[in-house]
Image: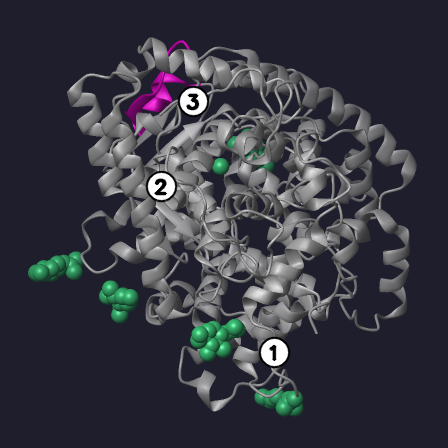
Amino acid sequence: MLKLSLIGWLLCSLAWRTTPTSCRQTRPAPSIQELLASQLQSYMDTRARPCENFYQYACGNWQLHQQPQSDHKEESPPHAQQQAQQQPVLQREQLEPSDTLAVLDHSLNRQLELLLRRNGSAEEASVAPELLEQMRSYYRACKRLKPYNLKKYLQLVQPGNGSHWPLLSRSQSQWRPETFDWLTTLGRLRAYGLNGVLLKEQVLPRWDDAASYSVYLDKPSAAETAPMGEGAIIELLLDIGQTKRVANELARQVDAFERQLHRLQELEDDEGAKEMQLGYLAEELPQLPWLRYMQQLHAVADDDDDDGDGEGDVDLLSTLIIQHVPYMRALEQLLQRQQPATLCNYIMLRLLAFLKQQGPAEISRVECVASLRRAMPLAASWLIGQRFHVASDEPLIADLFARLKQRFEQLLAENRLQLQPPIVQALRDKLLAMRLQLGFVQPNASEQVEAYYARVQLNAHNFYGNQLALLRLRVAQSHALLQQENSNNSESLSDMGYLVEHWLSSSSSPLYVKPRNLVLLPYGLLQPPVWHRNMSALQQHAVLGFALAHELLHGFDSSGIEYDGAGNSMGPSEEIAANARFAQSLGCMQQQLATGSRSLNEKLADYEALRLVYETFFGADMLLDRKEPRDPLLPQFSQRQRFFISYAQFFCGKLQGLSLQASQHLEHAVDELRVLQTLANYEEFSREFGCERRTKMQATQRCRVW
Ligand SMILES: *[C@@H]1O[C@H](CO)[C@@H](O)[C@H](O)[C@H]1NC(C)=O
Ligand SMILES: *[C@@H]1O[C@H](CO)[C@@H](O)[C@H](O)[C@H]1NC(C)=O
Ligand SMILES: *[C@@H]1O[C@H](CO)[C@@H](O)[C@H](O)[C@H]1NC(C)=O
Ligand SMILES: *[C@@H]1O[C@H](CO)[C@@H](O)[C@H](O)[C@H]1NC(C)=O
Ligand SMILES: *[C@@H]1O[C@H](CO)[C@@H](O)[C@H](O)[C@H]1NC(C)=O
Ligand SMILES: [Zn+2]
């Protein structure tokens, strides 16, 4: 039955791997090639004109073919239902997978859910049974929530120094502002994972020696200081049981503060990054008693049964790298002028927003798995690798990556930019050193992953406690990287800790890690329609090949060139930036940015990746006889046309674009515009579809860098 929706088939095929009997069919199942050919046609709106709007042409009927994703919600107790009614349709809407990546993650979550619900079989018990049990505890506690009550967290985590949250004091007059110290509070909450609120503290690979780590102190990013808006504040306050009157009043105050804070982003960093000892920082920037923050951070992180207001040991001789000192000074001035209660409320609201995002968006099985993947990213990646990783596919994917590298090496040798030979050599060295890694963690690293979680004991009846314990663990583990420099055995583990801490490992989106010169491909992405070993080579190139090429190109975008092959920020970026042709090409892309993507580097990666993967597959010599035999399953398209259709269909989705999570991570433009601009920029596309000059799918100016 060819009409079988691919998604239905996909679930079946994944289920098949764990339960071999559930998908047996009486007649021969269609091959993957047949399924993909029928899917490709079903998504297309062939009434649309490919040279006018190729996205509509390739994706116009995508939405029609998405099955309603019923999450087989449990019968919830009466007050949970009320809660659900208070937060109407809008929230439900967000939970529908809105694009290919979200569909993949959703189906992955459903598979994991089946696995966690079943009691351990003998086969499972042999690998890391404790770890699976911990994951089950988290999951069960999540399902028992009725409903997700953010106020519980405020009872468990206090601002420190004996202070309380103003809103939870019995009356406003009982709150004692003199005990509240914002830096103490931020240090405490940092230990629970809160970051990017007023300040940002991270453990990152050192710029000059990426194999070791340093503490970086910085201002929050512009996205992090962007005001939440009164509506979002009021919603959070109602969530924790405040009255409308109180919520409105508070939202006004906090909103006014957020706007002032956001304006500090305009300050230039004319002092640059500085490295100094903690003791010296106290003299250099006395307004910012950083020591208090660090003591709190370590006190909570080191203390296994946190209750305490103790102070952690902090070495005054340890160093940190501080950036945006002018911001820090201005921040302190701004905070001086605020009511302590407003400031404390602001911090509390940001904490609530952070915790809300960590938890399940609703109490359903699939959402509890999604929340598990956010809370235990390392364990979840490990489990996905255990269950869905097909070891025999690895050489195929490695080969695809190697051929992309080979073609890019030729492009570097052609040297369109006419760079000096040593620069070309440095770029080539970087390319050759670039690695591909499947999964955040190797499936055989069970012992290390178990060791990572050994310090926490999760409880199937205490969701809030679990959540806080896991958040603390992640922060403690990322700070433990500072001590790990010289230990022999844990190199790969330290990398795991770093990777999961800094990337959204709960999503299947691929990524490029600059300080590691590494392309990371989560196992979750290696499912149809993105990947299957039986797919045609064309399909493999057009979808997974494009994704790999896109990430590869991030190593050579305007920020990637700052990093060398070892991941140190010592790449030849100044020399390249000084090249007139390079500047001109970036300028060309910049012009197209006004209407499209938020980020120049995303544009660069898209444009150059499409060319790279196309030339890798079809060969670079465009004068060659281009009469590849047509596919009998899709005789109406030439192979080259089919390549562009498959490429475009990866981005099919609802028109609002990528899911919230993915867009935060990828900074990708709304998908439609992204596809249109990328194709219009590529002359091979217009040639293949016979687009006349002046049609929409022909850019007036084409941009190319490498
Ligand atoms: C993939 O191909 C192999 C051999 O060609 C075949 O045995 C297998 O059933 C195919 N799998 C799918 C899902 O089409
Ligand atoms: C799973 O195991 C628990 C005890 O470990 C038991 O109480 C429960 O009934 C089992 N459930 C199923 C479906 O076998
Ligand atoms: C802690 O609270 C005490 C009052 O209980 C106050 O005197 C002191 O200044 C506070 N410490 C900080 C760092 O604010
Ligand atoms: C895991 O497998 C990889 C190869 O896939 C190997 O290089 C590595 O040493 C293995 N690690 C452990 C801990 O066994
Ligand atoms: C590192 O390995 C060397 C020998 O290979 C050993 O002598 C040393 O104790 C190890 N250090 C640690 C921290 O494990
Ligand atoms: Zn990207």
Q: Is mark 1 within 8 Å of ligand 1?
A: yes
The answer to which of 536 and 314 lies nearer the viewer is 536
Does the magenta portion include 19? no
Q: Say left or right for 577 vs 134.
A: left
Percent x, y for residue 604?
Answer: 46, 27
Image coordinates for residue 128, horizontal then vertical, percent: 41, 77
Q: In this view of the protein, can residue 371 be seen by the observer? A: no
**Of discs 2 and 1, which sits in the foreground?**
2
As measured in the structure, the alpha-carbon distance from the residue carrying label 3 to the one carrying label 2 is 18 Å
- Image quarter for residue 8? bottom right
Q: Residues within 10 Å of mark 1 (few under 14, many from 20)?
A: some
Residue stretch rendered in magenta on the structure: 270-286
* Amino acid at dot 1: Ala
Q: Earlier in the sequence, mark 3 or mark 2?
A: 2
Specify the quadrant of the image occupied by residue 645. top right
Residue 268 in view, yes or no:
yes
Q: Which residue is mark 3?
A: 704
**Between 353 and 14, which is closer to the camera in this rendering?**
14
What residue is drawn where x is 79% and y is 72%? 74
Residue positioned 72% across, 71% down in the render: 144
Mark earlier in primary sequence (2, 1): 1
**Residue type, numbered disc 2:** Gly
Whole-percent x, y for residue 369 in the image:
62, 64
Mark 1, secondary structure of its residue: loop
Q: Quadrant of the C terminus?
A: top left
